[in-house]
Amino acid sequence: MGDRRVVNVYLLGVGFMLIFTAFTTCGNIEQTVIRSLTNTSFSGSGYNSLAIIYGVFAASNLVAPSVVAVVGPKMSMVFSGVIYSGYVVSFCKPMAWSFYITSILIGFAAAVLWTAQGSFLILNSDCTTINRNTGTFWALLQCSMLFGNLYVYLQWRDTIVILDHDRSTLFIVLSVISLAGTILLLLLRNIKHVENSSEINDPLLQDSWLLKEKVMSTMDQIMSEFRSMLRLFCTKNMLLLSVTIVYSRLVLTFYSGVYGTCIGATREFGPVAKGLIGLSGIFIGIGEILGGGIFGLLCVNNQFRRTSAILLGVIVHLLAFYLIFLIIPDDAPIEGVTRKHYEPYLFPSPAAALVSSFLLGLGDSCFNTQLYSILGILYPQQSGPAFAIFKFIQSISAAVAFGYSNYLVLPWQLLIMTTFCFFGTLSFFAVENIEDNALGLQDF
């Protein structure tokens, strides 16, 4: 059983790595790609698309646990993966109507996908393996930052304008990669099904019983999961963690959709600016993978405290924000750069931009691996509702962040993230203290 669970974790990580190789690369470059379109009739915005995705994502998290409970974690992830592939395909020939329709669909799919992922990971973990499995999954997932962005760097490093042929080729390749990841998720083994399949030996009786059971319990499951979410959301620990969760998504929104656009819009980088977008994504991925390895694969027996990882994340993120503030022009994130071009405080250096990318990825892995870990420890029997709330809060934060990215200059965006970094860290430490006190009382 243990080996089967380990295989499941690795298959889950590789499947997500392939799906998000396509989606993460797409999100990193889509605003830059849209700005380079020769089709002047296209009126879509990458920021608006991402805001729609995460807005629908937020609303869909209210029903995602019910969908996962009825369909099952495995098939929920497979169906969601197909929709992710459809979103990437829409960039092969961009049209505003298909662009925004797939944005709505992927918002729903994302809620189901991540709720199912959290539930499936908890089912394949226990209190002694949750850190290892979280780190393993996170490191594999963040490899998605490497491959698509490496292609972008190699193909676009001396490109001023992205041609239609180059765009189509890239998104066809990404679509195939996304579908390959979806197919890989079909190989996952359902632990509960394997354990209980011998209880009913007659195949006809088993099928009839399963069908009747599913029909009779569907509405009960939906209402039960929804009530569980509401109760869980109102608990003290979840309310405190909400601040940390908001911060984790603000940072991800910044590095996945805004920072790459900033680099591409910085004139001082010259003809290498477009290629630097891909290279920046690679360095973010290296930071994510390193963090996942340190806090998961190398930290056995829970010897490394979650608060230490969070503190490291705070330090590297604040350093990254300061470097970005110094070298990136204030108006770089704004769509359709204004008439007045702001000068950066220091002359932009590609090396400094890439160091900032690495620090963003490393700090993000510190926060996300520890959030996954503490949710798994606090709510092992309520993993579906817990991870649905986690993604609900994150998606609302992302929708708001992508919404203001079109209008706020860079210093204001950095200030917002710095503020949530401070209060989110305090909230996480408070939850850890509550948990430590509870464990101390159990020892008496």
Image (tube, rainbow, N blue to C red):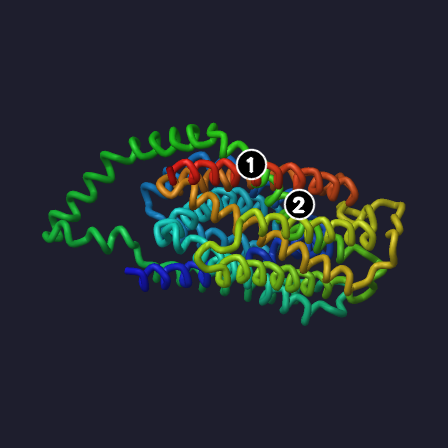
Task: Note whether residue 17 is visible.
Answer: no
**Residue 308 rendering spot, x and y as whole percentages:** 58, 50
Using residue 73 as the reference point, say whether residue 253 is left or right of it: right
Determine the residue positioned at 81% across, 56% down.
Answer: 266
Determine the residue positioned at 83% across, 50% down.
Answer: 329
Point out the image quarter for the C terminus.
top left
**Residue 357 rendering spot, x and y as whole percentages:** 69, 58
The label on residue 151 is none
Residue type, label 1: Ala
- Residue marked by disc 1: 430
Of the residues tagged 1 and 2, which is closer to the observer?
1
> With respect to residue 94, does 3 lie above or below?
below
Determine the residue positioned at 77% across, 40% down.
Answer: 412
Is label 1 in a helix, a strand or a loop? helix
Determine the residue positioned at 72% across, 49% down.
Answer: 318
Residue type, label 2: Tyr
Kindly indicate the quadrant of the structure image that contains residue 260. bottom right
- Residue marked by disc 2: 47
Using residue 429 as the reference point, say whether residue 412 is left or right of it: right
Is label 2 in a helix, a strand or a loop? helix
**Residue 157 rendering spot, x and y as whole percentages:** 73, 69
Q: Distance between the residues labelled 1 and 2?
A: 34 Å
